[in-house]
Image (spheres, rainbow, N blue to C red):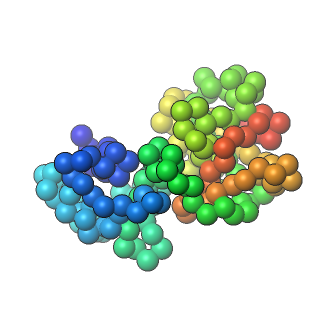
Amino acid sequence: MDIVEFLSRLLRANPPEVGLPRDRRGWIEISAVLSAIHNSGHTLDRRGLHRVVQGNQTRFAISRDGSRIRALQDRVREALDPPAVEDVPPSLLYHGTAAHYLDSIARNGLVAGTRKFVHVCESPKLAMEAGSLHGEPELLAVRAARMLEQRFVFYRAGEGIWLVRSAPARFLVRW
């Protein structure tokens, strides 16, 4: 298992044998995470951890003060607590998806499925990275300003990442 997969498992599942203490928002002290990584046989220091997070901005976030880390797509945390602070997003956001989902999205919009929220990004690049995880990537623009007019609620989940319960097809444009 590579370090990104291991970190994702550690932060999302938080296996009982590791027992990392996390708060209601899913934040875990970086020093505790680095100890768990070291104890597993992986080699990673604080600077390396920051590089992993920088290269995987749709998966992980480091707190503004640099002391804590969390998974951005954490089903356990999302079920227990609102994912982040309710906020007003930029007027246009982006969602990366695999091309084979476009027909379904045209009919149903973006739906959370087994999750509680749809993840959308401020950056087309981040959205395309997320979309490429599931096949040939396609980029959709999400008209967030129009959604706000219709009383949709957005949550700021991390640097450039936003969450919303759904995004009907009428608010989406293939980019």
Q: Residue at x 49, y 50 (%)?
A: 80
Residue 107 or 103: which is nearer the viewer? 107
Q: Compared with residue 105, is residue 95 higher up or lower down, i.e. above or below?
A: below
**Quadrant location, the N terminus:** top left
Can see residue 58? no
- Depth check, front residue: 91 or 108: 108
The spot of residue 6 in percent (x, y) is 28, 46
Q: Residue at x 20, y 57 (%)?
A: 36
Query: For this view, does 144 lie left or right of residue 85?
Result: right
Residue 19 pos. (x, y %): 24, 54
Residue 119 picture location, percent across and down: 59, 46
Tell me which corner region of the image, top left, top right, bottom left or bottom right, holds residue 161.
bottom right
- Residue at the (48%, 36%) spot, across then down: 133
**Would residue 172 be seen by someone viewing this image from the given angle?**
yes
Quarter holding the C terminus is top right
Q: Residue placed at 53% from the left, 54% from the top?
A: 81
Q: Is residue 67 left or right of residue 151?
A: left
Is residue 172 rendered to the left or right of residue 14? right
**Looking at the image, which residue sits at the far bottom?**
65
**Residue 9 rendering spot, x and y as whole percentages:** 32, 45
Q: How many marks?
A: 0
